[in-house]
Image: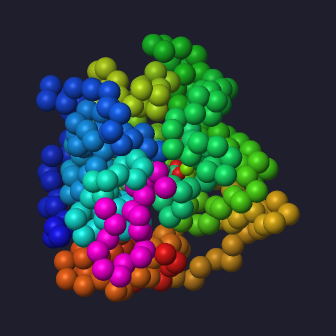
Amino acid sequence: GVVIVVPPVSNDTGIKMIPDNAHPFQAPGPNDQRGPCPGLNTLANHGYLPRNGIASFEQIITAVREGFNMEHDLAGALAGFAMLARGNAFIDLVSIGGESPLVPVLPGAIDGPNPPGGISKHGRFEGDVSMTRQDAAIGDNVHFQDSLYDELLLYTGRFGDDSPVTGNGSIVTTKVMQEFKFARFVEDQVKDPVLQYHVGRFTLSYGEAAFVLNFFANGTDGTLSTPVMGSFFRNQTFPDDWYRRSSPGDINLIGEGVDQILSAHPIAPGANDANGNYVLDAPLNTCSAVYFNLAVQNLPASYSKATGILKQNVNTLIQAIAKPFGCPAVFPTGPS
Ligand code: HEM
Ligand code: MG
């Protein structure tokens, strides 16, 4: 086993041009893992993450700061959740794509995330109503889908701002995400008979729209043009003359983004029933419903059987997930 140690907070958090000379784009090889996250895919294509797509908790936190200026505790919660949901916390490795022989099953009686699956595996982290990937029950939930991206471009043309450089209706704004995210929900509510949009996935889904606005935008002026967005989504490469954001993007920034995007069409968490009706969830009365749904209800209770290094790592990761929510760490109670 490998003992997981939360990296210290770095003070390298200013604006800078990305990539540097040490991190050129290189297309992934046939055995390299890539998956549903355009941010992590891009980092791996430039070697900010291991190019094989198999990464440790520490490597993910460092890479998302270096490449995108994602704040330390938000990164820790996402990386910790990915590791416990779909990785091997004993050897501190998770695939940013699918199943890999480099990430074997957990030792002992831990039947939770076995096989680990990688973050492409549906449920727990990967979920419904993504922007550029289909719901798992409808189609390809892992790879970039042209038809969905075309829809995002259509909404940008209709609701986006104008730019003297890239043209009219080519700047992606909160307004674009307000209309596009609502349209995606309406589509999947009709098309996906097993749509699951509980509070954890619901909030991550809106959070990922806020990631697009806040982490893909050029740090020079904070605007996001369609060519820049296309570089990340379609080509999974950093655009030319691109700067990461000028201050760390943390959970509060993303939370405000989620609230703004939702405010135009305020839908709520729920799931489709057997008749295709969207049934709202009862509110969870906890410190944070998002934290509780993701990290307590959706992570396997079998982690309680862990001993030794695995037990130590599980505790470290559970605390990393709880931290930016300001909630006490609670042990998982979910199914295998
Ligand atoms: C989606 C993991 C960081 C941007 C996803 C998904 C996973 C994931 C599992 C799929 C969810 C779904 O849509 O079903 C992670 C982890 C991170 C991380 C573990 C570690 C910190 C980032 C960063 C960015 C980013 C830094 C932006 C720079 C996105 C976007 C999507 C997404 C835009 C939605 C894609 C779509 O809906 O088409 N991420 N991510 N992520 N991620 Fe990440
Ligand atoms: Mg998805």
Residue 118 is situated, as x and y percent measured from the top left of the image, at 40, 55
Residue 105 within the magenta-colored segment of the rendering: yes
* Vertical relation: 320 (above or below) 180: below
- The residue at 27%/26% (across/down) is 25
- The residue at 59%/42% (across/down) is 140
Which quarter of the rendering shows the N terminus? bottom left
Instruction: Report whether 23 appears left or right of 288.
Output: left
Magenta span: predominant SS is loop
Residue 108 within the magenta-colored segment of the rendering: yes
Q: Quadrant of residue 66?
A: top left
* Vertical relation: 218 (above or below) 284: above
Instruction: Report whether 161 appears left or right of 246.
Output: right
Foreground pick, 242 / 113: 113
Q: How many marks?
A: 0
Q: Is residue 320 visible?
A: no
- What colour scheme does the image use? rainbow
Residue 289 is situated, as x and y percent measured from the top left of the image, at 53, 74
- The residue at 50%/24% (across/down) is 226
Residue 124 is situated, as x and y percent measured from the top left of the image, at 50, 64
Foreground pick, 6 / 224: 6
Instruction: Report whether 202 appears left or right of 16.
Output: right
Q: Quadrant of residue 127?
A: bottom right
Residue 184 is situated, as x and y percent measured from the top left of the image, at 68, 44
Magenta region, residue range: 104-121
Q: Is residue 135 visible?
A: yes
- The residue at 24%/70% (across/down) is 90
